[in-house]
Image: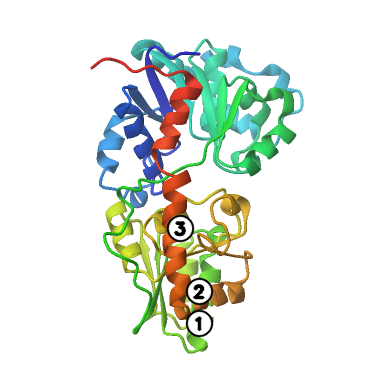
Amino acid sequence: MAAQGRLGYMVPQFPGQTHAFFWREVKELEARGVPVRLLSTRPPPPGLVAHAWSEEAAARTLYLGRPAVADALLALPALPWGELRAPEKGFLRDLAIALPAARRLGAVARAEGLDHVHVHSCGRSALIAALSRRMGGPSYSLTLHGPLSDYGPGQNLKWRGAEAATVITERLLAEVRTVLRDDLPPRLVVQPMGVDTGRFRRDGPYLPRATGPFRVVSCGRLNVVKGHQDLLLAVRLLREGGLDASLTIIGEDDAGGTGFRATLEAKVAELGLNAHATLLGAVDEGRVREELLKAHAFALASWSEPLGVALMEAMACGVPTVGTAAGGVRELIRDGADGLLVPPRDPARLAAALRRIAEDAGLARALSAGGRARVETAFHAGRGAEALVALLGLRAHPG
């Protein structure tokens, strides 16, 4: 397939707090002469829109809108009737939501000359693209960012109609080959996410802690799976062991500050860390870099992590990094070379790894240099756009 017109680029609830990667990829595609039409399901909650580019991105994005009964009825011929004999739990609800959006996607594609839509999700956005294709809409491709179980029912249907797909880790490649088998698209490649190594960098050498607080930074959505509660306990253990440690957590909960944040605030108080732990909220990339450059160490205590862009950003800034040996993190961090790995849900091991960085300046410097080199070599932002151009046969447009 060689796309001649504009490329549709769909991301759910765009632009959200974790969507810097997608905006960078759009810019990389456009720099290569590929015209991009941004698409999304609906805007994110206001508390999650934090980036300097968010307003521009939102203005460029077409939101496919909420379900409409009339559109759903007109879209009924596209229903995958074979899938409805024994539907998976939740599939009928997803269909009801996706059908009218699928019909609108087809109309937009015809009106705007979208030959192909790339979907950065395997959730409802992928179902919208699959149903639209069944109605004569544009061809589509997918990127899988985490385990299939995270993305709801109907995976076989979503993947069966795709022309191509990328997955972000070898671990996910093995999963889709096992689970989806004959429903996989003909072109399937591993392409990790990446970061802007020109933006995320330090101008001078990393300086290990000498005196004063040992500053730890974390960055990730506020939810239980990110393990922030474990990191808070690790900081408490460090302080009980005589190390003056402080923690800044960057990120917000999925409700824009009215959800899991309250649980973490209660945990901070329970552990007596009110003066030593800060929940910074959703902030732009400039502030993220600023906090990273002040840090002596970065830690992400996820129970499950598909790969970890936040880890990459810290490594790119030369911050010694501790991650959990969960999900795809082991494909990013090589323990002892570019960072340290600990088991998930183990605050004591996490505290011990952070203490090693605090007390061993040689190790801290080695991890700083190794992390930066690792990201520069294998996880820079341009690689994703290059992979899409090659995978989809995208052609540059003059002007």
Most extreme residue toward the left is: 399
Please name the residue that numbered disc 2 is placed on: 354
Q: Is residue 157 visible?
A: yes
x%, y% of residue 317? 36, 58
Tell me if mark 3 has few (under 14), some (14-19) or many (20+) residues whose alpha carbon lies within 10 angstroms of its own: many
Separation (CA) of disc 2 from disc 3: 16 Å
- Type of the residue with mark 3: Gly
Residue nearer the viewer, 380 or 168: 380
x%, y% of residue 201? 32, 55
| Residue at image location 59% in from the left, 14% down from the top | 78
| Residue at image location 48% in from the left, 69% down from the top | 264
Position of 144 compared to 81: left or right?
left
- Type of the residue with mark 1: Leu
Please name the residue that numbered disc 1 is placed on: 238
Residue 127 lies in quadrant: top right
Of marks 1 and 2, which one's residue comes earlier in the chain? 1
Label 2 element class = helix
| Residue at image location 36% in from the left, 41% down from the top | 15
x%, y% of residue 267? 50, 74
Position of 82 compared to 338: left or right?
right
Separation (CA) of disc 1 from disc 2: 8 Å
Whether label 1 touches label 2, CB < 8 Å: yes
Label 3 element class = helix
- Type of the residue with mark 2: Leu
Please name the residue that numbered disc 3 is placed on: 371
Quadrant for the C terminus, please. top left
Residue nearer the viewer, 130 or 96: 130
Label 1 element class = helix
Of marks 2 and 3, which one's residue comes earlier in the chain? 2
Separation (CA) of disc 1 from disc 3: 24 Å
Of marks 1 and 3, which one's residue comes earlier in the chain? 1
